[in-house]
C-alpha cells in the first residue's frame, strides 16, 4: 500500500533562497540517516500564495507504506538528538507567523488499481 503525507507551510518570498538552504540542510541530514526516518521518497514544491502577494506556500510530499511507522519515526527521531532539534528549529524559524496558518499533515492512500505508468517516459 502506498501512502503519502502532505505538509504545507508559508515562507516570505524574500526568504525563498534562505528557506531552500535550511530545508535542503534538513533533507541532507535525513538522507544521511535513513535509520531514523521511514519514507521511501520525499518531494518539495512551492507556489505563490493567492491571498498574500509577498508569501509562498511550500508543500512537501513524503511517500511510505506504513503510516504508523512513518509517524513514529518522525516523532522519535528528535529524541536525544540535539543536532536534529537544531535543524528543526531552523526550519520553523523561516516560516511566516502565525504558526496557526500551518496546514495540518494530510495522509492520502493510493488506489493502486488506478495507477498508470508510461514505461517509455522516465519518472520526473
Image: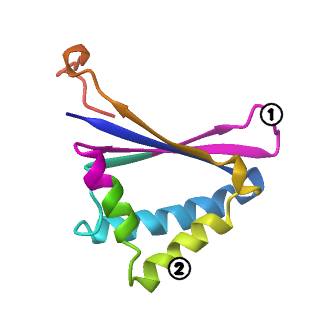
Distance between the alpha carbons at the discs numbered 1 and 2 = 31 Å
Is 43 left or right of 65, judged from the image as shown? Answer: right
Looking at the image, is mark 1 or mark 2 earlier in the sequence? Answer: 1
Is 92 left or right of 122, judged from the image as shown? Answer: right
Q: Tell me which segment is drawn in magenta.
A: 44-70
Residue 80 rendering spot, x and y as whole percentages: 38, 84
Query: In the picture shown, does residue 103 fall above or below 12?
Result: above
Disc 2 element: helix
Residue at the image point whose x is 30% and y is 62% from the top: 37
Name the residue beneath numbered marker 2: 86
Name the residue beneath numbered marker 1: 51
Residue 119 rendering spot, x and y as whole percentages: 17, 22
Quarter occupied by the C terminus: top left
Front one among 73 and 30: 73
Instruction: Specify few, some or many for label 2: CA neighbours under 10 Å numbering under 14, 14-19, or 20 or more.
Output: few
Residue 58 rendering spot, x and y as whole percentages: 59, 45
Check if residue 64 falls in the magenta segment.
Answer: yes
Find out whether the residues at labels 1 and 2 contact each other: C-beta distance under 8 Å: no
Check if residue 79 falls in the magenta segment.
Answer: no
Residue at the image point whose x is 41% and y is 74% from the top: 78
Amino acid at each position: 500500500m502506498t501512502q503519502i503525507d502532505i505538509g504545507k507551510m508559508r515562507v516570505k518570498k524574500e526568504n525563498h533562497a534562505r528557506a531552500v538552504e535550511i530545508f535542503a540542510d534538513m533533507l541532507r541530514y535525513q538522507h544521511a540517516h535513513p535509520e531514523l526516518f521511514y519514507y521511501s521518497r520525499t518531494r518539495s514544491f512551492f507556489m505563490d500564495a493567492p491571498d498574500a502577494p509577498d508569501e509562498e506556500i511550500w508543500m512537501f510530499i513524503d511517500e511510505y507504506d506504513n503510516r504508523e511507522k512513518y509517524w513514529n519515526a518522525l516523532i522519535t527521531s528528535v529524541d536525544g538528538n540535539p543536532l536534529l532539534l537544531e535543524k528543526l528549529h531552523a526550519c520553523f524559524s523561516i516560516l511566516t507567523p502565525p504558526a496557526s496558518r500551518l496546514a495540518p499533515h494530510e495522509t492520502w492512500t493510493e488506489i493502486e488499481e488506478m495507477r498508470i505508468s508510461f514505461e517509455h517516459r522516465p519518472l520526473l
